[in-house]
Image (cartoon, helix red, strand yellow):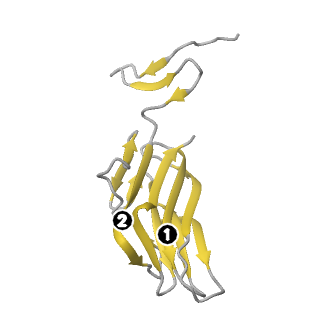
Amino acid sequence: MTSILKVSEIQDPTNGNTALTVDTSGRVKQPTKPVFYSIGQGSGWLSVPNSATLITGWDTSTSHYISQGGMSYSGGRVTVPVAGIYRVTGQIMARFTQGQYVLIRTALNASIQNTGQVYTTAGTLTQEPTLTNNILVNCSANDILDLRVQGSSSTAYYYLSSYSNFGIELVS
């Protein structure tokens, strides 16, 4: 037996909160979908530690901050509200010279899951590339996701406004 359900809005039965809307073209909007996004609010260039160190202090006071669907942010860590597959993205700008490296790393419950890296073997000029990281992570409810930075001595990362960001969204 085949059934067709034609609706433009789905709400929870208790409070009438809209969980999903469908427009006339079939586009779906999910206003309670878990999403987190923030930009850096540091004071410019910071020294990169030799071990994977939590990036803290993401900006929660500007229009660039998004936290919805039960995401919880505290001290650089984001707690996911429900089990599922989450896309985690991060970006920083790095500064280094010959023979140095900088890493941006995604951690799930303090365990490194993915690493984006820049490394140079030639030249003596200072380089300042943008370093990004993007991963899908299978999470349980209340798992904690964060970004970490690591590099060789005398390297730095830029942690300010449009040069750095951190995002998480439930995709499935």
- Please tell me which of labels 2 and 1 falls first in the chain: 2
Residue in the picture at 51% in, 80% down:
151
Does 160 sit above or below residue 144? below
Q: Nearer the viewer, residue 75 or 131?
A: 131
Type of the residue with mark 2:
Thr
Q: Position of residue 33 (x, y in %)?
A: 46, 37
Q: Position of residue 105 (x, y in %)?
A: 52, 67
Q: Quadrant of the N terminus?
A: top right
Q: Is residue 73 left or right of residue 19?
A: left
Spatial CA span between label 2 and label 1 = 16 Å
Q: Nearer the viewer, mark 2 or mark 1?
A: 1
Q: Quick one: SS at disc 1?
A: strand
Does 68 sit above or below residue 62? above
Q: Position of residue 34 (x, y in %)?
A: 45, 41
Q: Which residue is mark 2?
A: 56
Type of the residue with mark 1:
Met
Residue in the picture at 59% in, 56% down:
135
Determine which of the numbered discs, if any, sits on residue 93 in the image: 1
Q: Is residue 64 left or right of residue 61?
A: right
Determine which of the numbered discs, if any, sits on residue 141 in the image: none
Crowding near the residue tagged with mark 1, few <14, some 14–19, many ≥20 C-alpha atoms within 10 Å: many
Q: Quick one: SS at disc 2?
A: loop
Q: Is residue 54 visible?
A: no
Question: Total number of numbered labels?
Answer: 2
Residue in the picture at 66% in, 86% down:
122
Q: Is residue 66 left or right of residue 170?
A: left
